[in-house]
Amino acid sequence: DSGVTQTPKHLITATGQRVTLRCSPRSGDLSVYWYQQSLDQGLQFLIQYYNGEERAKGNILERFSAQQFPDLHSELNLSSLELGDSALYFCASSRGQGEAFFGQGTRLTVV
Amino acid sequence: AQSVSQHNHHVILSEAASLELGCNYSYGGTVNLFWYVQYPGQHLQLLLKYFSGDPLVKGIKGFEAEFIKSKFSFNLRKPSVQWSDTAEYFCAASNAGKSTFGDGTTLTVKP
């Protein structure tokens, strides 16, 4: 158990819908990262938050957004979903520039 | 642009064979390097990391990696693989909070 909790574990939704994925980082970790893992794109860094502020941005679509709350949990919002958004979404947390500890992921299926 | 490339997409070995997975990175400035492993159906876990100092780093489960600055490489090695090492291996680099992962190498170890 990495100490990073993601909910839900599985999500099935229709195209055009909006979903919210939630991540609780390890206790004491200020950084939260979101990644998308799909068969054709591999593991893609989406975005990082540090203590509530956006720190770095990767290949995140405009239809996607994220935020980190004062209690340090984070949410990834995916809207106007397309079939191609089906993937495993991982959250990770870390302290400073150290290694990232990954959650079990949320498997999103868009039908 | 920052990039990480892994040379082998799929490696098949017999138990007790030696392993070397290639990783090259393209980054400006100081970079932290990581190898992660993802066992089937599980989340990513850190195998080892390099921040500075001794370029030969040892990780968990008998894995090690060597940082060769002149070659921009961070290859993963293990002298004798086991069936339980069957997994996907990701090389990653981070700088200023932004991480880039390689496409991953699937290792299959035959008993």
Image (spheres, rainbow, N blue to C red):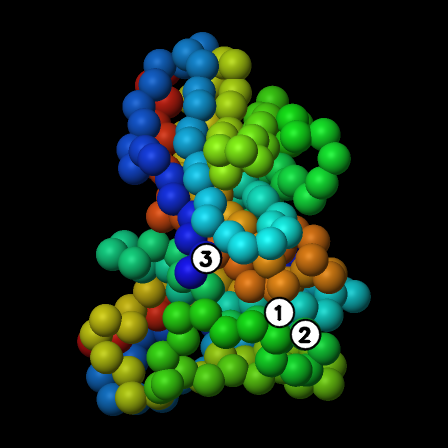
Label 2 element class: strand
Frontmost of labels 3 and 1 is: 3
The residue beneath circle 2 is: A50
Q: Is residue A93 visible?
A: yes
- Whether B80 is drawn above or below A57: the answer is above
In contact (CB < 8 Å): disc 2 and disc 1: yes
Mark 2 or mark 1: name the one nearer the start of the chain: 1
Q: Chain of mark 3?
A: B
Which of the 4 image quarters holds residue B94? Answer: bottom right
Q: Distance from label 2 to label 1 (Cα)?
A: 6 Å
Residue B26 located left or right of residue B105: right
Q: Nearer the viewer, mark 3 or mark 2?
A: 3
Task: Indicate which disc residue A17 carries.
Answer: none
- What's under tag 3, amino acid-wise? Gln
Report the chain holding disc 1. A
Compared to residue B59, the image places residue A50 above or below, namely: below
Q: Nearer the viewer, residue A31 or B53?
A: B53
Find out whether the residues at labels 3 and 2 contact each other: C-beta distance under 8 Å: no
> Which residue matches tag 3?
B2
Q: Dot 2 falls on which chain?
A: A
Name the amino acid, label 2: Tyr
Q: Does dot 1 land on a helix, a strand or a loop?
A: strand
| Marks 3 & 1, CB-CB < 8 Å contact | no
Between disc 2 and disc 1, the foreground one is 2
- Residue B9 % position (x, y): 30, 37
| B61, B28: nearer the viewer | B28
